[in-house]
Amino acid sequence: MPSLYLHIPFCRRKCPYCDFFSVEGHSAFLAEYPRLLVRHLELAGSRQGWAGPLETVFFGGGTPSLLAPEAVGAILEAAARLFGLAADAEISLEANPGTVSADSLAGYRSAGVNRLSFGIQSLEESKLGLLERLHTPREAIDAVEWARQAGFDNLSCDLMFALPGQGVIALERELDHFLALDPEHLSCYGLSVEEGTPFAHRHRSGGLALPDEDLYAELFKAVHQRLSAAGYKHYEISNYARPGRTCRHNQRYWQRQDYLGVGAGAHSFCANGWGERYSVPADLALYRQELELGSDPAESLESFDRRGAMSEQLYLGLRTAAGVCEEEFRSRYGIGVAEAFPEAVTRVGKRLRFEQGRWRLDLHGWLLYDHLISEFL
Ligand SMILES: C[S@@+](CC[C@H](N)C(=O)[O-])C[C@H]1O[C@@H](n2cnc3c(N)ncnc32)[C@H](O)[C@@H]1O
Ligand code: SF4
């Protein structure tokens, strides 16, 4: 088990577009949550099959930056004690710029976190207002400066594009604001309207002027062009990195390698056999109850057969620039990609390339990913 994901399901205020599992406000659970996570790690550690040392650790959310640095330190100590921690482990933490201070960032660095992912979304006042974010552009810029002062040399920023009323010129201006922060990594997500969120409600009643398909394509390509020209590699549909700065944790996920997920709402993947995925119910009261009874709160979500494993290997691998290696696929499944999925390969056509032993989608293929990948499922 060389990867650990910790889900921190708390947010100071829920953003109207987001459907990640998190509860609003300083829930009473937040104070006791670190203790529950350590208990969960102990239970998972005693189960066979999860063996360290950990190569990557990821505090995701929700808003992990609501945890005190001491709590992050205690969780990391427990993880190191139970599984071991590789000397060069990547330890990431997602931070909302509206919840950090120079001191808290310095505290995370001292606790062992060596990569921060800031949910900045936009550096323009009006867009942050629309997204109902907690922070101003200035506060986001300060957070990045404080992180540098605290010694972080691996920073990522989340940017949301395809926002209501946004055209290519406005997006290019936005990208330039982000580039001025000089992050090692950028995640750029097109706004997706998620069922059950206030944005979905507003969208249905005609209150969100979202870009049409053609404009979306132009925006997606504008992100690609601007960031590529600035020296970032577009290494996954939504992710860009300076050389050597891809997110190692997510790379392992896209390669279908083992990871343990702890925390309410977390998922795990165990690659034994054709692979099995587990999930922890997204319910804090149940989470506490299970842990207090000494039982592992994870339930089996999906047990893969060979066909399902092959589909998922393509589903995840084709999101990445590295794509899927034919030789590795054949040695794992005893069959090549084109033999396993002859109709899908034909239907996806020229958007799917086979070059130097690897299958990859081109840029236009990534744009049509949801549609194209359904051919393999
Ligand atoms: C789980 S959040 C973690 C960051 C932290 N909670 C924050 O917001 O500052 C991960 C990222 O997902 C993106 N995201 C969330 N909902 C989205 C949506 N509906 N459409 C596009 N991107 C979204 C945002 O960029 C967000 O920063
Ligand atoms: S975007 Fe981040 S801060 Fe906003 S609700 Fe989602 S997880 Fe919480």
Image: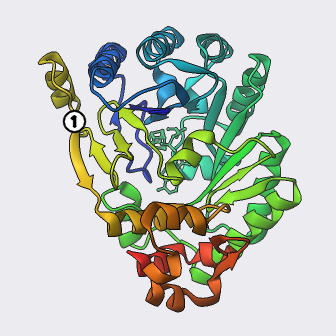
Identify the image quadrant of the C terminus.
bottom left
| Viewer-side residue, 264 vs 47 | 47
- Circle 1: residue type: Asp
Does label 1 point to a residue whose CB lies under 8 Å from ligand 2?
no
Residue under label 1: 283
Q: Is residue 157 visible?
A: yes
Identify the residue at horizontal 29%, vertical 33% (top origin).
264
| Viewer-side residue, 266 vs 339 | 339
Left or right of 257? Residue 184 is right
Up-down relation of residue 18 to residue 286 (above or below): below
User: Percent from the top left, x then y, of residue 200?
Assistant: 37, 63
User: Percent from the top left, x then y, of residue 343?
Assistant: 45, 90
Identify the residue at horizontal 66%, vertical 48% (top origin).
122
Identify the residue at horizontal 77%, vertical 42% (top origin).
244
Q: Is residue 191 visible?
A: no
Identify the image quadrant of the N terminus.
top left
Secondary structure at badge 1 equals loop
| Viewer-side residue, 295 vs 367 | 295
